[in-house]
Image (spheres, rainbow, N blue to C red):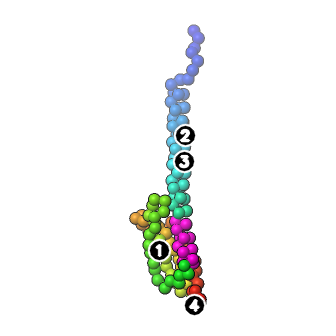
Amino acid sequence: MKRAAGFTLLEVLVALAILAIVLAAGFRAVSLATGSAGELRERLIADWIAQDRLAEHRAMEHFLEVGRYEGSVTQAGREYRWYEEVTATPNALFRRIDVRVTLAGEGDHALSRLAGFMVKPLP
């Protein structure tokens, strides 16, 4: 009598177990990559907001008083909070401004930090 060619039940189960492990690892990798892309997008938008704040002060020739300022802005359908801290420098004609941007309602985690300087406009 001739034996039928094929796989045994045990071989099929082992192959399915290996396939399940490989697919689970693949889905995990895709999930992590997708999450990273979303976080990078939020950080990029936060960087733009911080740069916009500094550019606005330069363009409007602002010379803010020493202190803290804050506000919010909506970009890409999300609300972001910005915080500015203006400090004096040894030269009275310059001020340092530190901008920090967070997602509104999601704690104090800074997505972006940027520092710049303001120059007192000449009279």
Which residue matches tag 1?
A: 83
Q: Which residues are magenta?
A: 46-59
Which residue matches tag 2?
A: 22
For the point 51% across and 55% down, the residue is 38
Instruction: Kindly indicate whether the residue at mark 3 contacts the one at mark 2 (C-beta within 8 angstroms).
Output: no
Report x, y in % for residue 35.
Answer: 51, 53
Q: Which residue is outermost to the top? A: 1
The crowd level at tag 4 (other Cα within 10 Å; few <14, some 14-19, many 20+) is few
Q: Secondary structure at mark 3?
A: helix
Disc 2 and disc 3: Cα gap in Å? 11 Å
Looking at numbered disc 4 in the image, what kind of residue is underneath it? Pro
Looking at numbered disc 1 in the image, what kind of residue is underneath it? Tyr
For the point 55% across and 66% down, the residue is 48
Looking at numbered disc 2 in the image, what kind of residue is underneath it? Val
Which residue matches tag 4?
A: 123
Disc 4 and disc 2: Cα gap in Å? 70 Å
For the point 53% across and 86% down, the residue is 88
